[in-house]
Image (cartoon, helix red, strand yellow):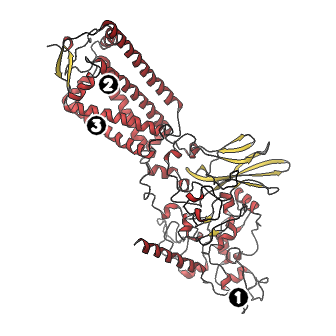
Amino acid sequence: MRFFFILCLGFVALQANAVHAAVIHPDVTPRDLSGQPVATLAQASESASCANCHDSDAIRSSLSPAHRQDPESLTQLGVIRHRLGQQSLNSGGDSGCSHCHGGSLSLNETGLISGASIRSGRAPDACASCHGEIVLHNQVPFTPSDTAQPADLASFSGALLSGQRINSSGINISDKSTRSDAFDIHLARGLVCADCHRANNRPGNKIGHSIQETKTASVHLKQDPRDVPIQDYLHRPDHTMQDSLQCTDCHRSDAGHSWLPFTQRHMSALACESCHIPALFGAALESIDLDNGEQTVRGRNQQGLIVGYAPLLLASQDKLAPFNLIAANSVDQGSSTTSILAVPVQHGVVHDSAQRECAACHRPGGLVEGSLDLGSAVPHATRRFVSPASVKAPQFDLSNGRLIARAHPDTAGCYILGADQVAWADRAGMFITSGTLLGVLLHGLARYLSFRRRGSQRETRQRIYMYSVYERFWHWLQATAILILLVTGAAIHKPYVFDFLNFAYMVELHNLVGFILLINAVFAAFYHLASGEIRQYLPGSSDLFGRMFLQARYYTQGIFRGEPHPFAKDAQHKLNPLQQITYFGLLNTLLPAQILTGILIWGAQHWPEQTAALGGLGVLSPLHSFMAWLFAAFLIMHIYLTTTSGPKPLSGIQAMLEGWEDVEKSSGGD
C-alpha cells in the first residue's frame, strides 16, 4: 500500500511537471503601438501585441509597485532593494510583459511570435528571472552561485528556492548528512510560486482571497462564490502577486500541533515561519556598501562551511516573525548613513527540522531574544531602520566595532514563561523561603541539643481518633498536588535549571494537577461547611492575641524545656491558635489567589482580553511565582512543625496516615 501511494505521488508530480512545460499559448502577431503588424521584434510593442487578447493597461495597473517598477510608489525598503539589484525604475514606457513571460521571444517561420517562447504564469522561470534559481525536483544536486546576487530572494533572506533535500544538494553545508529536510517543503511537494501568489480573480480560487470583487456585490458578502468566466480572466488576470495565501488558508493549525501546550496562544503570538524556518542556508547579505557594491554574507564559518543562520524574530503586526537584517551603508553629501533593512523571511519552510524544543525559546537568551551581527559599524554613521510600518525595530548595540541587532519579545507585547524573569518575585520569594529553612534548621538543632541535655521524658498520652478518612484523603491529595505543582512550576519558570525535564510535559502536568487541586479544594470547602469542621479553622476573637502569644512562647521557650503544649488537642480542637491564623490566611487568601492567577495564566489563550485587563502575563506570572515561593516556605514550616506534635518526630505524619494520634493526656484529658 505504501509503495502504491508513493507511486501515485510520483505520477502526479510528473503530470504537474508536464503541465508546467506544456505549450499553452498560441502564436502572436507582432504589432507596433498603432496596432499595425510589423516584421521584427524590435519594431513590436508588447502592450499592442498582447492587447488583442489581454487588457495590458489593466494588468499593469494591478501590479504591485515593486513589479511595476514605479519609484514613486515604492517604499524606502523597495527603493534600496532595487538599487541593490541595479534594476531600472521607470513608470512609463511599454507594459513589460516579456520581463516575466518572455524568456527569449522568437519569431517562427510565419513571422509570428512563437507561443513556445512565451512563458506561462505558472512557469517557475517567470519568477526565477528576478527572484533567483528555482529547483523543483531532485535531478541534479542543487549548487547555487557561491556569491549573493542582490537581485534574488536568497541574497536578501538566505532562503534557497529548492525542493531538493539538503543532504542531496551540492552545497558544502556543515552536518549535511544529518539534514534530511528539503530546502523548502512547498517546492518539494510540487507547488510553484503561482500556487500561493495567485491572481485574486483566478477561476476556481476558493481559498483565502476574494474571488471576484464587484461594485454590485452585496455589502454583507465577504466574497462572491461565482467564478469569473475563463475568457474574462484571460482578458484581465489580476497581477497583484505581492499578496499571497497565508499558512492558515491551506493548513489547519489545530492539526499536527497537539504536542504543543497552549496551542492557540502560540498561534496568536507567533507566525508559523518562526518555528518552521529555524535556519537558512543561502548566501544571505549581512552588509553592503551602496556606493561601491562591496558586500559580506552571513552563515559561514572560518573553514568556509555553510552553517546557516537563525533569522531574528521581530514583532510584526503583534506577532513574532523571522527577519534577516542587512546593514546598507552609503555616503550622501559627506554624511554616512547606515540603513538597516528588515527583510521578511517567508520561504525555506521545513517540516521535520521545524523547531520543537520548548526550551529553545522558554529560557533567558533564547530564540525570542536572538541577535544578528550586521558587520563592521561605520563610525559616526546615522542609523535608520527601514522596514514595513508594522515591524518594530530591535535594539542596536556596538560591540568591538561590530553593529549588533538584538530582539526581545516585549516588542510584541509577549511575556515568555521561562524566558522573562522578574527579579523582585524570585528575590523576595527566595529570601522568605531560605529564611524559613534556616530558621527551621536552627530551631531543630536547638531542640536536639536541649533534648540531649535534659534527657528523655515520658509523658502520659492517650490514643484518640483524630482524622476521618475524607480528611486524610483531602490532606494527602492536596499535599501531593502542591508538591507536584511546585516541581513542575519550577521546571516551567526555570527550564534552563531543570533541562532534564521535558518542558511541554511539565506544562501539561502542571495544568492537569492544577485543576485537580481546584476540584479538591471545592469538595473540601463543601465538606468542611456541611460537617461544621470549618470551625476548626476559625481563630475566634476571644483573647486571640493572648493565646497566640502563649503558643509562640511555647515554640520559642517551652519546647526546649520539655513543657507540655499550652492548648489541649482533641478531635474538636485539632489546631492551636497559630495554626488557625496561618490556615485561615492560607485557605482564604493564598490558595484562592494562587488558583485564580493560575487559571488566568492558563486562560491567556482562551480569554486573552480578560487576562490582559488584569495586567497580562507580565503581572500574573511573577505574582504566581512569588506565591509559589510562599507555599514552599509554608511546606517547610508545616512539615517541621509536625515533628513537635508527638512523642516521635514522625508521629504527626503517622497520625495523618492512620487517623489515630497519641496526644498528651494532660492536654487531651479524660
- Which quadrant, please, contains the N terminus? bottom left
Can residue 317 be seen by looking at this rendering?
no
Vertical relation: 517 (above or below) 18: above
Write down the residue under mark 2.
Answer: 583
Quarter-wise, where is residue 638 in the image?
A: top left
Using the image, tell me which numbered label, if any, was put on residue 190.
none
The secondary element bearing badge 3 is classed as helix
Relative image position of residue 62 (x, y in whole percent): 64, 70
Write down the residue under mark 3.
Answer: 520
| Sooner in the amino-acid sequence: mark 1 or mark 2 | 1
Q: Is residue 630 left or right of residue 246?
A: left
Relative image position of residue 302 (x, y in whole percent): 70, 50
Vertical relation: 54 (above or below) 134: below
At 51% across and 58% down in the image, what residue appears? 352
The alpha-carbon separation of the residues under discs 1 and 3 comes to: 83 Å
Using the image, tell me which numbered label, if any, was put on residue 29.
1
Q: Residue furthest bottom?
A: 110
Relative image position of residue 418 (x, y in whole percent): 50, 40
| Sooner in the amino-acid sequence: mark 3 or mark 2 | 3
Q: Residue furthest left?
A: 670
Q: Nearer the viewer, mark 1 or mark 2?
A: 2
Q: Nearer the viewer, residue 308 or 152?
A: 308
Quarter-wise, where is residue 304 in the image?
A: bottom right
